[in-house]
């Protein structure tokens, strides 16, 4: 059965090849992504989002199974997203809202400060799946992550705010492999059973680091997690293994291509580091599992 996704973010969701029908609304209209030295364009407002959404409704094609959101820079736009999600959930109580709460990384914000309370108080409570990095997870909960136990407590705090699935996409936690070349990610999925009881599956993923800066990986990650949690709704371990393996294949193909273009001893430029999405179509559709997740308590 075909699934329909409303994607409201800075990049089109990479879901077409996995059988999703995607309606896309840009949150920003830029000449290029902000990884370049210069860019021009506009940040969409709530009024502009409202007009576009009303156009979809007038044609009676606003029956969605998923909503996916990512980067935005305007508080009114973000608040309008919440209104849209709530309206769509009233029409379809099974709708799943996947939110990448884009706030910042490595201790600093790269969106306006006034977006933070909107995410914390309005967006996260209506989300079903969220994909913060460590900085964003700490900011949303007010708790620092220094150990795996801290990370589990932060994910539980995020569950208590609303989402049933939380994946901390990257952290500064030490790798169990004893190797600084690996990045630690963690995930948690809460299940409510018919009798009202709850269980939680938590996983840890060790991901090889790459010495390069990519733009769009957060969008790709959220889209892939949407797709693979759809196929494995009760198996976060498998959904994460598929998602992180797609990321690995795309990034490795991209960095190999970028180094070939840059030449020996040269650091690749932003244009050379554009994600090789089309070339990775087969890996997106059926990724070889190269990143295994470990179930943790």
Image (cartoon, grey):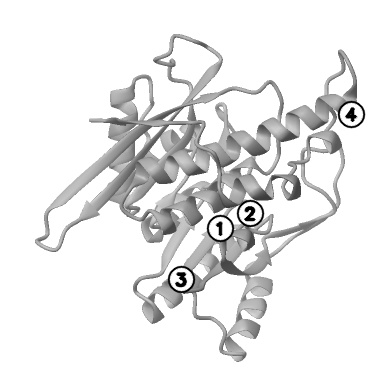
Q: Nearer the viewer, mark 2 or mark 1?
A: 1
Q: Classify 59 as above or below 166.
A: below
204 or 35, nearer to the observer: 204
Q: Are marks 4 and 1 in contact (CB under 8 Å)?
A: no
Q: Which residue is mark 3?
A: 65
In the displayed image of the protein, which residue is found farthest to the top? 178
For marks 2 and 3, the one nearer the N-term is 3
Residue located 35% across and 71% down the image: 94
| Label 2: few (<14), some (14–19) or many (≥20) C-alpha neighbours in 10 Å | many
Earlier sequence position, callout 4 versus callout 3? 3
Q: On the picture, is 55 further left or further right than 92?
A: right
Which residue is identified by label 2?
72
Q: Give the label, 4 or 2, closer to the camera.
A: 4
| The label number, if any, that marks residue 261 in the structure image | 4
10 Å neighbourhood of mark 3: few (<14), some, or many (≥20)?
many
Which numbered disc covers residue 69? 1
């Amino acid at each position: 059965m075909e699934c329909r996704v409303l994607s409201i973010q800075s990049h089109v969701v990479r879901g077409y090849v996995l059988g999703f029908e995607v309606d896309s609304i840009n949150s920003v209209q830029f000449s290029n992504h902000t990884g370049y030295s210069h860019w021009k364009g506009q940040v969409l407002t709530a009024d502009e989002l409202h007009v576009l959404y009303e156009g979809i409704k007038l044609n009676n094609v606003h029956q969605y199974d998923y909503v996916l959101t990512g980067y935005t820079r305007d508080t009114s736009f973000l608040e309008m997203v919440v209104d849209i999600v709530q309206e769509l959930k009233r029409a379809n109580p099974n709708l799943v809202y996947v939110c990448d709460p884009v706030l910042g990384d490595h201790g600093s914000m790269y969106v306006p400060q006034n977006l933070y309370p909107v995410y914390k108080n309005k967006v996260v409570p209506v989300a079903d799946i969220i994909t913060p990095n460590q900085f964003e997870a700490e900011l949303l909960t007010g708790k620092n992550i220094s150990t795996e136990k801290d990370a589990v407590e932060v994910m539980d705090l995020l569950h208590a705010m609303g989402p049933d699935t939380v994946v901390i996409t990257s952290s500064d936690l030490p790798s169990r492999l004893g190797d600084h070349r690996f990045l630690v990610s963690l995930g948690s999925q809460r299940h409510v059973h018919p009798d009202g009881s709850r269980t939680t599956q938590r996983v840890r993923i060790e991901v090889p680091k790459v010495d390069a800066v990519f733009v769009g990986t957060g969008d790709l990650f959220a889209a892939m997690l949407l797709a693979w949690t759809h196929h494995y709704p009760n198996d976060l371990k498998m959904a994460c293994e598929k998602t992180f393996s797609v990321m690995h294949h795309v990034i490795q193909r991209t960095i190999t291509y970028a180094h070939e273009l840059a030449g020996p001893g040269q650091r690749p430029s932003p244009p050379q580091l554009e994600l090789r999405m089309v070339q990775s179509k087969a890996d997106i559709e059926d990724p070889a599992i190269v990143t295994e997740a470990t179930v943790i308590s």
